[in-house]
Image: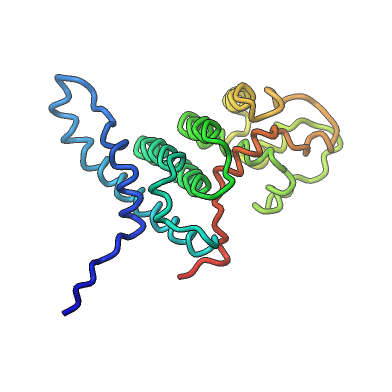
Amino acid sequence: MDNEQPKAGAGDYVYALTRAGISQIPFIGAPVAEILPLILAPPMEKRRSEWLKDLGEQLKLLEKQVEGFKLESLQNNETFITTAIHASQAAIRNHQQEKLDALRNAVLNSALPNTIEEDLQLIFLNFVDELSTWHLRELKFFDNPRAWGQKNNIDFGKPYMGSPSQIFEKAFPELRGRSELYNVFTKDLFSRGLMTTDSLGVTMSESGIFASRITNMGKEFLQFITSPINEELKVG
C-alpha cells in the first residue's frame, strides 16, 4: 500500500505564512459588530481564498523560472513573510484588479534574492494600498509616454508646443477637461517622491512634453510592482 504523504502545495505555503496576519483584521465595534460579520465574512473569505490561490500559482511559476529558488525556503525568509502578510491584508481591503496585481507582484519580487531593502518594500506596499488605480496609471504613463503610446496604439502626433496634460488627456480621454482631478494624482505622487513635478500644465517644447517625469524612486517602485515572471516562459 502506498503510504506516501501528500506534499504541501504553493497555496498551502502562502496560506501558512499569511494566515496569522490576515486573521487580525478587526471588525467595527458593537453594536453593528453582531451584524457586520454576517455581511463581510463571506466576501472577505472569498477574497482571501482567491488571493492566496493566485499568489500560490504565481510563486510556483517563479520557482520554475528562477534557478535555485525553492518555495520551501520562504518559511525562513522573514522579510518575505512580513511583506506577504502586509500585502495580503491590503489585498483583502481591495477589489480592483490593478491594485491586486501590483500587490501580488510586490510579493513575488520580495521572494527573489537581491530584492530591495525591507523598509522600502513596506513603504511601497503602503503606496499601493493608499493610492488609487489612477495614480498607478499616471505613474506608468509618465515613465515613458512615447513607449506607453506605442504599446497602447495611441498616436500623440507631433505637437510643436504644449503641456504634459495634453498628451495625458489624449491617453486617457475619460480625464479630458478634468485637470482638477488629475492634478490631485500628480501632487500626491510628487509628495511621495515618485514624480519630479507637481503640475502637468506647464507649456514646453515637444521634447519636454514627452520627457519622463518620474524619479529614480518612482522607477524603483514601478519595478517592484511589475511581475518578475516572464510571460513567454509560462508553462501551461
The answer to whether 202 appears left or right of 148 in the picture is right
The answer to whether 23 appears left or right of 169 in the picture is left
**Residue 5 x %, y %:** 23, 67
Quadrant (top left, top right, bottom left, bottom right) of the C terminus = bottom left
The answer to whether 56 appears left or right of 159 in the picture is left
**Residue 139 x %, y %:** 62, 36
Q: Is residue 49 visible?
A: yes
Res. 21 image quadrant:
top left
Quadrant (top left, top right, bottom left, bottom right) of the N terminus = bottom left
Which of the two residues, 130 or 111, is positioned nearer the viewer here?
111
Q: Is residue 179 visible?
A: no
The relative height of residue 130 versus residue 22 in the rendered view (above or below) is above
Rendered residue at 77%/24% (across/down): 202
The relative height of residue 13 versus residue 3 in the rendered view (above or below) is above
**Residue 140 x %, y %:** 63, 41
Rendered residue at 52%/60% (across/down): 68
* Residue at the farthest bottom position: 1
Res. 54 image quadrant:
bottom left
Rendered residue at 35%/49% (across/down): 14
Image coloring type = rainbow
**Residue 146 x %, y %:** 74, 46
Rendered residue at 71%/53% (across/down): 150
Which of the two residues, 74 or 227, is positioned nearer the viewer here?
74
Which of the two residues, 11 or 35, is positioned nearer the viewer here?
11
Res. 44 image quadrant:
top left
Q: How many marks?
A: 0
The answer to whether 178 appears left or right of 149 in the picture is left
Which of the two residues, 141 or 169, is positioned nearer the viewer here?
141
